[in-house]
Image: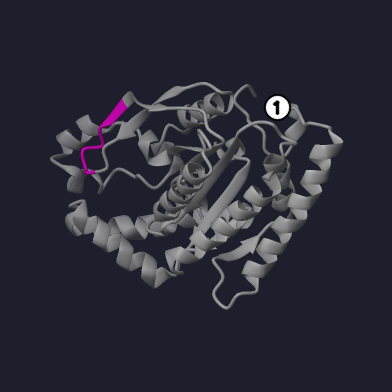
C-alpha cells in the first residue's frame, strides 16, 4: 500500500549505505548500545522493563548512518500511564543535547490526540461534554483519523514540511486542521493511546510502550478527569478505558521494542537516554 512505511523490511523504502567505515562504526555502536541496555536492566530500579535485542541492531543502523534518513518513534500506553510525560522528557533531553552540540532539526513531535475527529456539534446537541461522553466512545481507534496521521508522518520522513491539526482537549472536541507547522527532523516522535494500533503501527521504526501500575494510573486519571470537568461520567469513562485497553492498547506491550516503567522517577529514564546520547557523541568524534 502507498501509505505503508518502513518497519520490518528496511530495504524497501530506504537506501542502506554499504561502506566499510560506516559498517565498522555500526558494529561499534551496536556493541555499545547492547552494553547500555544490559547495564540498565541490571539496576535495582531500571527505567526499562524489557527490550527487543533486534531493536539494538536497527538503532545502530540509524545512528551509524547505514540508514541515511530520519527515524520515527511511536509511544503508546494506557490512559494516564505517563506516555505524554515520557515523550516531553525525551524531547527535552534531545533538544538539550542538540543545543549543546549544535545539532539542527533533531526532533519533531506529532501528537496522536490531535487526530481525534471533530465532534463539537454533537457535544453541543448533547448539552455538554459530560452528557456526550456517556454515549460516545473516545477509547477506540476509530475515534481518530489515524490515516491522516500516518500520511503526515510519511511526509515528514520524506523530508516534507506539514501543517498538523490541533485538537481541543478541554471538552469542546473541536479540531482545527492545518494549523501547526511541523518540519522534518532526525527523529519524528508520536505518542497516544492508539499510536501502536494496527492501522498506524507500521509508520514507526521504533515502538515504545509505557507501563504503569493500576493504582498509580487510577489516581492520575481522576485528577485529570476533574481538570477536564468530566463530572459523574468520569467513573464510566475510566472503566470503559480499561476495557478497551485490553483490546486496543495492551497488545502493544508485546510488540514494543522498549517497555518503560512509568512508575519510576522521571530522571531515571532521562539518565538512560543521556547515556545513549553520550555514546553517540563519543563515536562521532
Above or below: residue 40 compared with residue 282: below
**Chain part drawn in magenta:** 170-176
Tag count? 1
Residue at far bottom of view: 44
Describe residue 84's horizontal placement relative to residue 261 as left or right.
left
Residue 112, compared with residue 210, is above or below; it is above
* Vertical order, 34 against 114 (above or below): below
In terms of secondary structure, what is the magenta stretch mainly?
loop
On whether residue 172 falls in the magenta region, the answer is yes
Residue designated by label 1? 13
Residue 7 appears in the picture as rendered: yes
Give the quadrant of the N terminus. top right
Looking at the image, which is closer to me, 17 or 4?
17
Percent from the top left, x then y, of residue 40?
A: 62, 68
Identified at 65% across, 49% down, the residue is 280
Q: Residue at x 15, y 42 (%)?
A: 128
Residue 142, magenta (yes or no): no
For residue 197, say whether it is visible. Answer: no
Q: Is residue 108 shown above or below 215?
A: above
Amino acid at each position: 500500500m502507498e501509505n505503508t512505511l518502513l518497519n520490518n523490511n528496511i530495504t524497501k523504502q530506504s537506501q542502506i549505505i554499504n561502506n566499510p567505515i560506516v559498517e565498522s562504526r555500526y558494529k561499534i555502536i551496536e556493541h555499545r548500545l547492547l552494553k547500555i541496555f544490559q547495564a540498565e536492566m541490571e539496576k535495582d530500579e531500571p527505567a526499562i522493563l524489557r527490550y527487543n535485542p533486534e531493536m539494538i541492531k536497527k538503532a545502530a543502523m540509524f545512528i551509524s548512518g547505514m540508514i541515511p534518513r530520519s527515524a520515527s518513534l511511536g509511544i503508546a500506553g494506557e490512559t494516564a500511564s505517563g506516555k505524554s510525560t515520557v515523550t516531553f522528557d525525551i524531547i527535552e533531553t534531545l533538544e538539550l543535547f542538540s543545543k549543546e552540540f549544535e545539532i539542527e532539526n533533531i526532533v519533531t513531535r506529532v501528537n496522536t490526540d490531535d487526530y481525534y475527529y471533530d465532534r463539537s456539534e454533537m457535544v453541543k446537541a448533547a448539552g455538554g461534554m459530560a452528557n456526550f461522553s456517556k454515549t460516545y466512545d473516545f477509547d477506540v481507534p476509530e475515534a481518530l483519523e489515524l490515516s491522516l496521521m500516518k500520511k503526515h508522518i510519511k511526509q515528514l520522513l520524506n523530508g516534507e514540511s506539514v501543517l498538523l491539526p490541533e485538537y481541543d482537549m478541554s471538552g469542546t472536541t473541536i479540531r482545527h486542521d492545518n494549523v501547526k507547522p511541523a518540519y522534518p527532523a532526525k527523529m519524528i516522535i508520536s505518542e497516544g493511546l492508539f499510536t501502536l494500533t494496527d492501522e498506524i503501527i507500521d509508520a514507526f521504526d521504533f515502538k515504545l510502550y509505557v507501563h504503569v501500575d493500576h493504582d498509580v494510573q487510577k489516581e492520575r486519571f481522576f485528577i485529570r478527569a476533574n481538570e477536564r470537568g468530566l463530572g459523574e461520567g468520569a467513573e464510566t469513562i475510566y472503566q470503559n478505558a480499561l476495557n478497551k485497553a485490553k483490546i486496543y492498547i495492551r497488545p502493544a506491550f508485546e510488540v514494543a521494542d522498549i517497555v518503560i516503567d512509568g512508575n519510576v522517577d522521571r530522571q531515571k529514564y532521562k539518565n538512560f537516554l543521556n547515556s545513549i546520547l553520550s555514546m553517540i557523541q563519543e563515536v562521532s568524534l
